[in-house]
Image (cartoon, grey):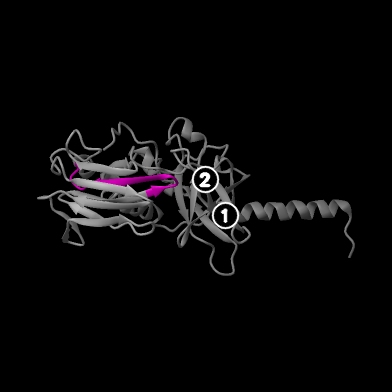
Amino acid sequence: MRLCSFQIIILLLLFAACGQTELGPAEVPNNYSEQIEEWKQNRVESLKAPTGWLRLSGMFVLEEGENTFGSGADRDVRFPEGAIPENAGTFIYENGHVVMQVADGVEVLHDEESVSEMVLYDGEEAPRVEHGSLEWFVITRDDITAIRLYNKENEQADAFTGFPAYPVDPEWKRKARFIPNPEGATISIVNVLGQQVDARSPGVLEFTINGETFTLDALEGGERMFIILGDETNRTETYQAGRYMYIDYPEDGSEYTVIDFNKAYNPPCAFNVYTTCQLPPPQNRLETAITAGEKRPVEWEGL
């Protein structure tokens, strides 16, 4: 059967309408609000954990050679006063390796065993050590090698109950089409220090808002996809540098998944100055307002 031009146009419009319907709101269970509240509570508990982001109290960049540490004012790496002796030891940073030498009379534990000297970084492994309420280890960010310090005694973290957020709205749980990238594809990601890396991207997520189609480039996030996004609410209500989300991969045999913007959350740099958050790539800065998820922290003075 031959179709006239008018019939072909109608069919194309129908196909386009079907595609937009597929990318509309996702189904939500009857207890959806309770599920979001449970997610929020789990997030609070994670942030308040002994080494959660709320208890991060320092990032100290190491200089080549000897770096003294302790609570003394003259230490190169100064830990919180009263939490550790003034002179606790030395970090020796040479040839990409970090060795810790502990001062006499100071107890530092690794796996509950006292250590006087140990390798804190050998190019791959970065074991954690503790003294009282403090726990620290080495992190590397491109050409930066630093000590990351947590303090488990933190009244502000103890009192934390969650960030301001938009009311839960089922309309912000959206169907999305996953468009795979070629194997090994990467996108450029910049962090708050201005460092740039090429991060592996499994694919692109396509979805609609008010009938308009948008896309987000995904990053590998373990068993899920990791999304760094910006939107128009960053100007006034949400964190200026964007927010994060995790998204499930489609089930086997399907090209569809779900983006739940009610779970868009603040990156650690929104509330802690000792972090090195990644920023949204330009293509993930949406020209629309995502009025869902966590809002900008209010009167957060840092840790």
* Residue lying furthest bottom: 252
Q: Nearer the viewer, residue 149 or 122?
A: 122
Question: Residue 215's spot in the image, x, y percent?
Answer: 60, 48
Q: Is residue 47 left or right of residue 10?
A: left
- Whether residue 156 can be seen here: yes
Q: Is residue 59 left or right of residue 291?
A: left
- Whether residue 161 can be seen here: no
Return the residue at label 2: 189
Q: Nearer the viewer, residue 174 or 30?
A: 174
Q: Is residue 203 left or right of residue 151?
A: right
Q: Which element type, helix, strand or loop, lies under badge 2?
A: strand
Marking on residue 265: none
Number of labels in the image equals: 2
Question: Residue 177's spot in the image, x, y percent?
Answer: 60, 56
Question: Residue 205's spot in the image, x, y percent?
Answer: 58, 53
Q: Classify 224 as above or below 296.
A: below
Quadrant in the rendering for residue 159: top left
For marks 2 and 1, the one nearer the N-term is 1
Return the residue at label 1: 176
Placement of the N terminus among the 4 image quadrants: bottom right
What's the distance in space between the residues labelled 2 and 1, CA to CA?
23 Å
Q: From the viewer's perspective, is the residue at label 2 or at label 1 nearer?
A: 2
Q: Nearer the viewer, residue 46 or 250?
A: 46
Which segment did they paint magenta? 140-154
Check if residue 37 falls in the magenta segment: no
Quadrant in the rendering for residue 271: top left
Check if residue 153 falls in the magenta segment: yes
Q: Main secondary structure of the magenta part?
A: strand
The residue under the point 20% across, 53% down is 130
Quadrant in the rendering for residue 14: bottom right
